[in-house]
Image: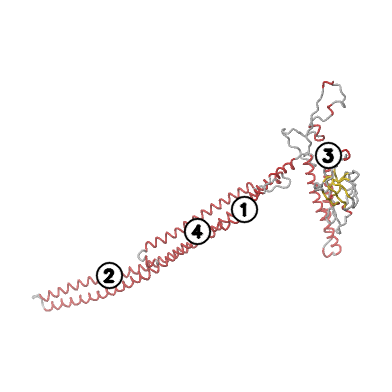
Amino acid sequence: MDWGTELWDQYDIIEKHTQSGLELVEKYVKFVKERTEIEQNYAKQLRNLSKKYNLKRSGKDEPDSRFSSYQSFLDVVNEMNDYAGQRELIAENLMMNICIDLTKYLQELKQERKMYLIEAKRAQQSLESTYKQLDSSKKRFEREWREAERTAQYAEKTDQDLNATKADVEKAKQQAHMRSHVAEECKNDYAAQLQKYNKEQSQFYFNEMPLIFNKLQDLDERRVRKLAQGYILFSDTERHVMPIIGKCLEGITKAGTNVNDKNDTMVVIEQNKSGFERPGDVEFEDYSQGINRTSSESSLGTPKGPMDILGRNRSKNFWLFSKKSKPTVTEDFAHLPPEQRRKRLQQKLEEICRELQKEVDQSEALGKMKDVYEKNPQMGDPASLASQISQTSQNMERLTGERVKYETWLAEALGRGETLHYKSHTFNNNGAHDALSPDGAHSDESIPDPSQAIYAEFDDDFEDEELAAPIGKCTAMYSFPGASEGTISMQEGEVLAVVEEDKGDGWTRVRRHDGDEGYIPTSYVSINLKK
């Protein structure tokens, strides 16, 4: 069924319906625009929220940087920032694919509808004009016919009048005949106009208007289909970003699962362990024995509490709940507890060694470049490298001085009765620190030299302690001189008992059959521990 057939007489209804349909499109466009504004504001607020809480990831020296809960919180904030980006994408796609597209299509529909309505008006005006001509000819025919009847009656009356002359009778008949002729012409004209009007009316109701109504029906159907597509796009726009939003949510979930409570509490220990011993018992001072005692006999010379036990750290307050003043930061980290000082010195020394290695590599590269320039002057002027070579040498000298300074401080920190080890970096032109030679044999450069800064603090009284039970055996793959304090020499192929495993510093504690104990490089031996 179509509008042209079924609604041939409902022009006003069709006009009103099509106008209402276009208004619905406009209303939907406004609805989507407001939804877009909501999404944009939501995304903006999420962005601001993420920016507010997304502190830049702390460096390695920051206390919170190593906590899994802290890093996971940053991950949550970053995922929320990505989520905000997806909300912005939704707003952008809604605006582009629905609002702008539908607005453009709506303008086209309005122009098309306006054109069809103009065609209908013209057809109607043409039919009305024909009807006016018909009505005019009808009225003229009616008027002339009545006049013809009147003149005919007058002629007949004159003919019957005995007093009327023959001329009067003839004149009346001629007048009646003329009026009759005019009336007949008006009748014919009226019939022709009637036929024309009926033809145009039939054309109007069966051809022109049905065609226009069908065009409006097609327009309305296209409008409805386009609007339906807009409804679907409203859902699809968000559905298309759901996988990415899902990944953001998965990232937040993963951030939660990455939190390690045990690790965080261990980090607290690692970051804040002082290394101090707990205070010993306070001795009883018996004043009843008299007050004239020599200083050697008095208990005043013995450790009585935390201040005496601290040794060189007497100034540090050991009361757990006392308010601690902020210490003055020193270059050698002496303001820190022993454990923390050792760690900071090691970190600083590793940084200096890395920088020094870069300068060594830079120096080697500049030396090679200078040799190339000297052999091939067309490639460059060797003198142009002088300033860079000089600067690199100064940097190396400065860093070497700093390395020695921090090695000295580290040796001092390691000399507080702790079994801790540090092996200094050695540098060569190839950037290697120590290892085996390419053919697998031990390189002479890797043999520890007493002149190098190898610092360690070992127990000096091994013989005074109760011997620890061996935990395994090891076989020496290379000879080791054991020149540094606390180390022990060994020969290639010698079998030794393992007393203490490598704690990550590259040294293993061993014992000979004769009872001698000391540390050897872990990489020099093949270890077989007991299960």
Tell me the number on the disc at residue 231: 4
Q: Position of residue 463 (x, y in %)?
A: 89, 39
Query: What is the quadrant of the N terminus in the image?
Result: bottom left
**In the image as oriented, which residue stretches furthest toward the front?**
531
The numbered mark, 2 or 1, whose residue comes first in the sequence reads: 2
Dot 4 alpha-carbon crowd within 10 angstroms: few under 14, some 14 to 19, many 20 or more? some
The mark lying in front, picked from 3 and 2, is 3
Q: In whole angstroms, how far apart are the C-alphas of marks 4 and 1?
A: 26 Å
Q: In whole angstroms, how far apart are the C-alphas of marks 2 and 4?
A: 56 Å
Name above or below for residue 178 compared with residue 307. Answer: below
The mark lying in front, picked from 2 and 1, is 1
Q: Residue under label 1, please give it.
A: 248
Amino acid carrying label 4: it is Tyr
Q: Residue under label 3, please give it.
A: 417
Tell me the number on the disc at residue 136: 2
Q: In whole angstroms, how far apart are the C-alphas of marks 4 and 3?
A: 77 Å
Q: Please tell me which residue lies in front, 200 or 320.
A: 320
Please, what secondary structure does the residue beneath circle 2 have? helix
Q: In whole angstroms, how far apart are the C-alphas of marks 3 and 2?
A: 131 Å
The numbered mark, 3 or 1, whose residue comes first in the sequence reads: 1
Label pair 4/1, CB-CB below 8 angstroms = no
Name above or below for residue 71 compared with residue 235. Answer: above
The numbered mark, 4 or 3, whose residue comes first in the sequence reads: 4
Q: In whole angstroms, how far apart are the C-alphas of marks 3 and 1?
A: 51 Å
Amino acid carrying label 2: it is Ser
